[in-house]
Image: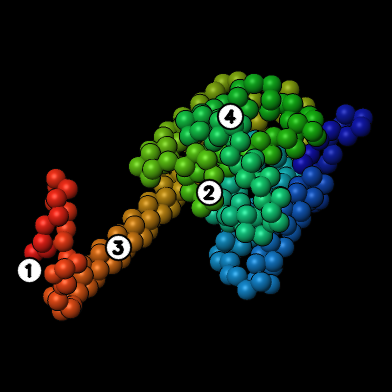
Amino acid sequence: MLLRTADGSTPALPPFDLGRIVTEAGIDPVATILTIWVAGAYLVGVRVLRARGDRWPVGRTISFVVLGMGSFAFATMSGLGAYDNVMLSVHMVQHMILTMVTPLALALGAPVTLALRTLPARPRRWLLAVVHSTPVKVLSFPPLAFLLFVLSPWVLYFSAWYPASAESTYVHEMTHLHLVATGALFLWPLVGVDPVPGRVAYPFRMLLMVLTLPFHAFLGVTIMNQDALIAEDHFRGLGLDWLPDPMDDQHLAGGILWGTGDVVGLIFFMALFAQWVRSSMREAEREDRRLDRLERQERQDRQNRLGGPEPDPDRSAQADAGGRRVPAAE
């Protein structure tokens, strides 16, 4: 994360290449604290489950800790974080990781389910109250979550928001959290396994996912074809002689948003379709088991009627529709 120094100058950075993603990695205080605390709390929950003999899928742990919090740390503390305010193209890679990769991996880790299984009674009630509170239900309402997800980037890049994030540490950090939050609000009910509000039938989930594709493409093409430079004063004033032309870099950033948005969106679509197929197969298995139980019960009842003791004629009277007592059928 490159911001102005106290005298208003720009810290020197070497020319960017792929190797700088590793060599220019650093510590971001907010990202470091969040990564340690959130990943640590999740691992403590897994340990509590195992200590009492319960199982927790290893894949969920890998998804949340390694892919989820790992991608968040990578996007904010690797060289991507060092150059995200220097090159819009680098920022765009960071943007896609924070809005799509990180929320998806966190959702597949099922942290709410883990917390409900490990927290004491009172904190568990608090968590349930938050999950089912009116603000959460409103924000996770699928059409609203969809609008927040697709409109936030337009506001970010075509208002004073992005220039402010380049100049202010606080706005910069809050922007990172906002990108993750909007991605989570949209993706968690669609692909996650937690019992959260906003879950809808699979056909509607597929429709929402498909609708995101043209929005990313249209935004990417708009950025590529725009004549005005995003955050022009900021990029023109960096004073780094190795930087590419800001307009060329902006065209590259738009292409990254267009291409990766479609690719990642299609991956999400296929993952969601696979979940739908597995859910349908599990439902079919449950229905088969239910029908098998009914068939076994009917067969047992038939055997009892045919092979059981003869009915007692003195006690086998039955009431007819009018309430009269009549002898049971032989």
State whether residue 230 appears in this view.
Answer: yes
State which quadrant residue 66 falls in: bottom right
Q: Crowding near pointer 4: few (<14 within 10 Å), some, many (20+)?
A: few
Q: Crowding near pointer 3: few (<14 within 10 Å), some, many (20+)?
A: few
Q: Where the N terminus falls, by quadrant?
A: top right
Q: CA distance from mark 1 to mark 4?
A: 77 Å
Residue located beneath label 1 in the image: 330
Is the residue under label 4 in contact with that under label 1 (CB below 8 Å)?
no
Q: Position of residue 216 (x, y in %)?
A: 49, 34
Q: Callout 1, which amino acid?
A: Glu
Q: Position of residue 277 (x, y in %)?
A: 35, 56
Dot 4 falls on a residue whose secondary structure is helix
Label drawn at residue 290: 3
State whether residue 261 appears in this view.
Answer: no
* Mark toward the start of the polypeptide (4 vs 3): 4
Label drawn at residue 195: 2
